[in-house]
Image (cartoon, rainbow, N blue to C red):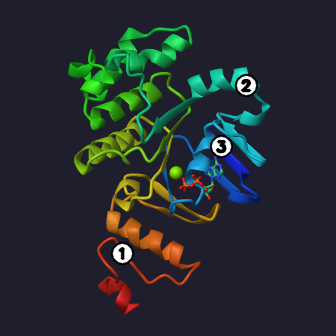
Amino acid sequence: MSPLVVENVAKSYRQGARDVTALAGVSLDVPAGRFLAIMGASGSGKSTLLHLMAGLAVADGGRVLVNGTDLATLSDRALTVFRRRQIGLVFQSFNLIPSLTARQNVALPLLLDGKSDDARVESLLNQLGLAARADHRPDALSGGEQQRIAIGHALVADPAVIFADEPTGNLDSANSDIVCELLHDLSSRGGKTIVMVTHEPAVAAFADEVVVIKDGLILDRFEATARDADDVARRYQAAIRGTNDQAPMTSKGPMSKSQAAT
Ligand code: ADP
Ligand code: MG
């Protein structure tokens, strides 16, 4: 069974007097080692989907299976332990503990689980290019370094799936590329299964496959193996355009030659 299976998940939120449907029934099967990007406009349901898959929120309907376990069958306590061991999380805002060093932040999930593995922590710090910064606290580090610590924190327990919500949203383009490259390598060479939410074609282009969502539904999915941001932008816009009357757009401008010709 794939490390991540999502079956027809739905979620609504109460907003004042009305119910807002954030997800209207989404299914995904993410095989081991796949790097999947989820793209969609603001409000399309990306974060809601990620939160449900990571066990941070409970679906109104449908099922999420991580490593074969239906998250809904776990008690709160069991879910906390399961998430610590099987689910790695990376957020736009890094979410590090300010009073802990880089090394301690990376090691924290092991510590919370009553374990320690100094060799693994050092090897991760090396792999992430953080060895020289290991004794610094987050506020002494750049955004790119902080996000790499967060990735180390997400990886240290060797979880079944890594989830990342707009992981490059607070980074400049140089650091964004470093983090994207790292996620790509973790999947292509390290065999990690990664699901990343982004609205940027240049970021999604590092993934193996792109899933486009709109209004809480999957609109389209396509391979992104060529790492071609313009191609991802075109296909994303084409998917979005298929359901409304927006003017054709690419990441380079209103209409490319190839589109004008068709
Ligand atoms: P995205 O991450 O794609 O921007 P979200 O999943 O955050 O989208 O939101 C999808 C929809 O659900 C939006 O209409 C949003 O306003 C609504 N929503 C999300 N979280 C909440 C919440 N905690 N309470 C009420 N409405 C929410
Ligand atoms: Mg979001």
Asked whether the beta carbons under mark 2 and mark 3 sit within 8 Å of each other, the answer is no
Q: Which residue is mark 1?
A: 250
- Please state the horizontal and vertical placement of residue 257, each as a whole percent of the image: 30, 86
Asked whether mark 1 and ligand 1 are closer than 8 Å, the reply comes as no
Of the pair 200 and 14, the residue shown nearer to us = 14
Instruction: Name the residue carrying label 2.
Output: 76
Residue lying at 35% horizontally and 35% vertically, measured from the top left: 147
Q: Nearer the viewer, residue 158 or 163?
A: 163
Q: Earlier in the sequence, mark 2 or mark 1?
A: 2
| 58, above or below 120, in the image | below
Residue 250, quarter of picture:
bottom left
Q: Kindly state the secondary structure of the residue where label 2 is placed.
A: helix
**Separation of residues labelled 3 and 1 (CA atoms):** 31 Å
Quarter containing the C terminus: bottom left
Residue type beneath disc 1: Thr
For label 1, count other residues whose C-alpha is less than 10 Å away and answer few (under 14), some (14-19) or many (20+): many
- Left or right, 234 with reference to 70: left
At label 3, which amino acid type do we have? Leu
Left or right: 212 as drawn, with respect to 120:
right
In the rendered image, residue 185, in percent from the top left (x then y), is placed at 35, 40
Which residue position holds label 3?
A: 52
| 3 or 1: tag closer to the N-terminus | 3
Q: Is mark 3 within 8 Å of ligand 1?
A: no
Distance of label 2 from label 1 (alpha carbons): 45 Å
Which residue type carries mark 2? Asp
Secondary element type, mark 1:
loop
Could you tell me which residue is drawn at 37 percent across and 16 percent down? 100
Q: Quadrant of residue 214?
A: bottom right
| Among numbered discs 2 and 3, the one appearing first in the sequence | 3
